[in-house]
Image (cartoon, rainbow, N blue to C red):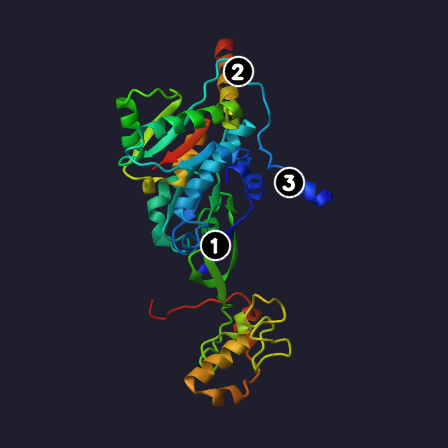
């Protein structure tokens, strides 16, 4: 479904861990953040950013 | 042979490579089950383990509560990555 | 029930992208069972379209909604406000629902998000098979409860053709020979005598050949 929109499906991940796995949680967070950092912002983010910029310019003009 | 080479090729990301603005920080949402992952995150906090601040946790009563629409809504708002843990 | 399949996303997008406002409208009966057109699917479709619009830099106000059935007037009451304000509607109902909405809202463009495919059953979760063609003249009573109109590729009425082998149809190895199923059933019922009875030529005027059909209850 995401692929259809040009979003990399790797941006979604599922993990399994138990309540006692505090360190694993930190590990997952670090790992996933690194992955996303490597992938860069999502295409939607770019589009939203562009929209924001555009409305900002309009405001300035007005 | 050409067909074989195609098969081996890794599936490419559909996203275009673009310049990343300098002030960009990954925005990640984690859907966590109240009873396992959320407790684990709590434990990580208690143990004072450091993990990236990019991850925002959404607590669910159970990961079974997770719905496709939650993931889509996150992406709709420009989130860069979503993971579910439970 | 009625089975439908969602159209390719690109096709849907091409239909609706020209509008400034769009309501994605689900139908929570048949097409919800096949996970293609229910109110939940409408919500997902709306989300996908919103993301697509954002990426294309288009300002489209996309709402989503839905009702239990798009083929009956009373169900529309709860969605009246939503539909009255809509510039265009993307209906996730079967062809009946789409036409019903179109007839109800004369000045609102209505687009189909689904291809209505057939009348079928839920064989397993997520697996649907065709079982009826609505031919208007049911013969299940003499064929052991197996429909030769919808399940025999050639719609044969008096036994299998020569293409039946090992219980499968010559059209595809995945299709059961309907007449094999008929014989199996009749044998199990001890009614093989029925198999020998010749079925007279079917009255196809009760099928679509007689034009669009309708049915009216006199006491209403």
Q: Is residue C42 above or below residue C120?
A: above
- 3 or 2: tag closer to the N-terminus: 3
Residue C197 seen anywhere in this rendered image of the structure: no
Mark 1 highlights which residue?
A: C94
* Same-subunit check for callouts 2 and 1: no
Mark 2 highlights which residue?
A: B21
Place of residue A31 in the rendered image (x, y in percent of width and height, measured from the top left): 44, 27
**Distance between mark 1 and mark 3 Cα atoms:** 41 Å
Is label 1 or label 3 in front? Answer: 3
* Identity of the residue drawn at 39% across and 21% down: B52
Along the viewing direction, whichever of B84 and B48 lies nearer the viewer = B48
Marks 3/2 in contact by CB < 8 Å: the verdict is no
* Identity of the residue drawn at 53% across and 26% down: A39
- SS for tag 1? loop
* Chain letter of the residue beneath label 1 in the structure image: C
* Identity of the residue drawn at 37% across and 38% down: A16
Q: Is residue C12 above or below residue B49?
A: below
- SS for tag 2? loop
């Amino acid at each position: 479904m995401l692929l259809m929109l040009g979003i990399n499906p790797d941006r979604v991940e599922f993990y399994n861990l138990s309540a006692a796995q505090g360190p694993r949680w930190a590990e997952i967070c670090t790992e996933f953040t690194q992955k996303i950092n490597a992938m860069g912002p999502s295409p939607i983010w770019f589009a939203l950013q562009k929209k924001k910029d555009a409305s900002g310019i309009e405001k300035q003009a007005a | 042979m050409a067909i074989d080479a195609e098969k081996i090729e890794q599936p490419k990301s559909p996203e275009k490579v673009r310049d990343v603005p300098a002030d960009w920080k990954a925005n990640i949402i984690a859907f966590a089950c109240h009873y396992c992952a959320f407790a684990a995150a709590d434990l990580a906090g208690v143990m004072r383990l450091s993990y990236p601040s990019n991850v925002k946790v959404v607590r669910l009563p159970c990961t079974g509560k997770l719905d496709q629409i939650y993931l889509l809504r996150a992406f709709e708002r420009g989130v860069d990555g979503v993971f579910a843990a439970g | 029930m009625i089975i439908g399949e969602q159209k390719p996303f690109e096709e849907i997008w091409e239909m609706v992208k020209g509008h400034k406002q769009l309501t994605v409208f689900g139908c929570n009966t048949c097409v919800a069972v096949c996970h293609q057109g229910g109110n939940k699917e409408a919500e997902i479709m709306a989300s996908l379209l919103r993301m697509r619009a954002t990426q294309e830099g288009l300002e489209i106000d996309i709402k989503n909604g839905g009702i239990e059935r798009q083929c009956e007037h009373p169900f529309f009451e709860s969605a009246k406000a939503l539909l009255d304000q809509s510039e265009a509607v993307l209906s996730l109902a079967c062809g009946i629902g789409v036409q019903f909405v179109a007839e109800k809202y004369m000045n609102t463009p209505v687009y189909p998000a689904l291809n209505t495919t057939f009348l079928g059953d839920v064989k397993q979760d997520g697996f649907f098979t065709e079982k009826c063609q609505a031919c208007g003249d049911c013969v299940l009573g003499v064929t052991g409860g197996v429909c030769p109109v919808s399940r025999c590729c050639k719609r044969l009425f008096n036994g299998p053709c020569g293409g039946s082998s090992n219980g499968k149809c010559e059209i595809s190895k995945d299709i059961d020979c309907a007449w094999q199923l008929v014989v199996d059933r009749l044998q199990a019922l001890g009614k093989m005598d029925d198999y020998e009875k010749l079925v007279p030529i079917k009255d196809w005027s009760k099928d679509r050949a007689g034009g669009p059909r309708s049915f009216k209850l006199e006491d209403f």
